[in-house]
Amino acid sequence: MGLCKFVGIVCLLHASLVLHIFSSASLIPEETSQIPVYFLNYAKKSELFDWMVHIRRQIHENPELGFEEFETSKLIRAELDHMGIPYKYPLAVTGVVGFIGTGAPPYVAIRADMDALAMQENIEWEHKSKVPGKMHACGHDAHVAMLLGAAKILQEHSHELKGTVVLVFQPAEEGGGGAKKMLDTKALDKIDAIFGLHVSVNYPIGAVASRAGPVLAANGFFEAVITGKGGHAALPQHTIDPILAVSNVIVSLQHLVSREADPLDSQVVTVAKIQGGGAFNIIPDSVTIGGTFRAFSKESFIQLRQRIEEVITKQASVQRCNATVVFNENDKPFYPVTVNNKDLHEHFQSVAQEMLGSRNVFEIQPGMGAEDFSFYAEVIPGNFFFIGMENETQGKFARGHSPNYKVNEDVLPYGAALHASLATKFLLKYQSESTSLSRGSQDEL
Ligand SMILES: [Zn+2]
Ligand SMILES: [Zn+2]
């Protein structure tokens, strides 16, 4: 067989394969309970799976920190252009918001975060981070790939959507509060519901976990400088020792949770940073400490903030030191409690059960971690969930923010299909109930 003829047959075969995929794609199952499995099978096809893996690896090789995700954002926009999906850009510096469906209400959003962490990757592999000191160690590269995968599934079925799916690619989840900045742009003002996910090694591949109500804590950071008077370590009477003052400050801070908080109202105060002194025989002028505080209610959070400031300044003064406390909300905004809407959580459970079976849908206890998805969920009914990556046969996966962190790429089809199913079925449900879960605006975005 001549090469031309062979290539021709291969091309024909390829074309019919593509055609087959595209023609079957135009038929969302009439029985809506079959949509999630249909989308999962669709996402597992090698064309879509390999494409998501490729995207994820490209982003992994070029990690960018919060509000600096220029190349990541460019890659996302190129893929959206390729799929013919319109979008708004720039939002909150690097953010992108895409639209699939009728362009009219209702609007359901699915969200991914794009930023990496300032740390060095420890694992040698073909697609290791090419940027020294930066790494995708929280799986946000996978989140972007999954949302683009969902975009592909939804765009193939766009004429069957009963409203508009809004794709939210946001910057700076890791401490920068990119979600808040996205909301500030007003681009998400008319959204009726929003879904977000995070990969997790706590659950097996093919399983998800969430809960109704508070799911993650409110989070704030503090930093304090305690200043005394430095001098010779052998002549303390001529100094005012900030190291002794800080020792008492740290112990007193621990009493906030153990003695002042209701034992049934979970809270955390952690001093995670301490800097001061550089020699064995010198008492330093000042010592800096810093840390985080967490709570599950606004009241407890505000109370902690106030008491942290009081305890540091007053306890320092007992040892004749001065203290200044900063909460630095511009750089590190406080994250509210992440609260899942009850109705949306039920929607999530039913979609996830249809896709994965009820024994793979876990109800979890709230955790002391924090997520800036909380900003969305404060103003839009939202549901945040974890998606499992653990697989014993592939060894132990390191936890997030570890230099040995690895994404199990088998998770990508699950994330893409869940995003697509949650959105599609929300629009169907919204239409059939013809009542809004929230504001129910009839305005166009
Ligand atoms: Zn993280
Ligand atoms: Zn994360």
Image (tube, rainbow, N blue to C red):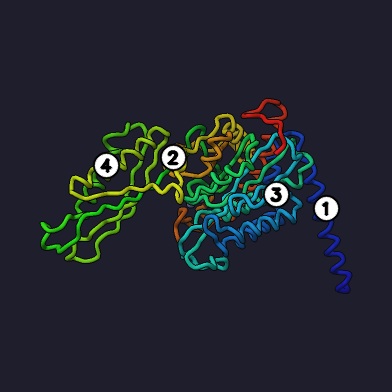
Q: Secondary structure at mark 4?
A: helix
x and y, in percent, of residue 427 in the image: 70, 34
Say which amino acid is labelled 3: Tyr
Disc 4 versus disc 3: distance between alpha carbons? 49 Å
Does the residue tagged 3 have its C-beta within 8 Å of any atom of ligand 2? no
Where residue 323 appears, as percent x and y from the top left, is: 27, 49
Q: Can you say whether 125 is above or below 116 in the image?
A: below
Q: Earlier in the sequence, mark 2 or mark 4?
A: 2
In the image: residue 43, left or right of residue 288: right
Please tell me whether residue 232 is drawn above or below residue 188 in the rendered image. below
Say which residue appears at 25% left-offset and 57% top-offset: 286
On the image, numbered disc 1 is attached to which residue?
19
Q: Which residue is mark 3?
A: 87
Q: Nearer the viewer, residue 416 or 433?
A: 433
Separation of marks 3 and 2 at Cα, in angstroms: 32 Å
Mark before the other along the chain sequence, 2 or 1: 1
Left or right, 435 with reference to 379: right
Q: Cα distance, mark 4 to mark 1? A: 68 Å
Rendered residue at 18%/49% (across/down): 320
Residue 184 occupies quadrant: top right
Disc on res. 217: 2
Report whether residue 284 is seen: yes
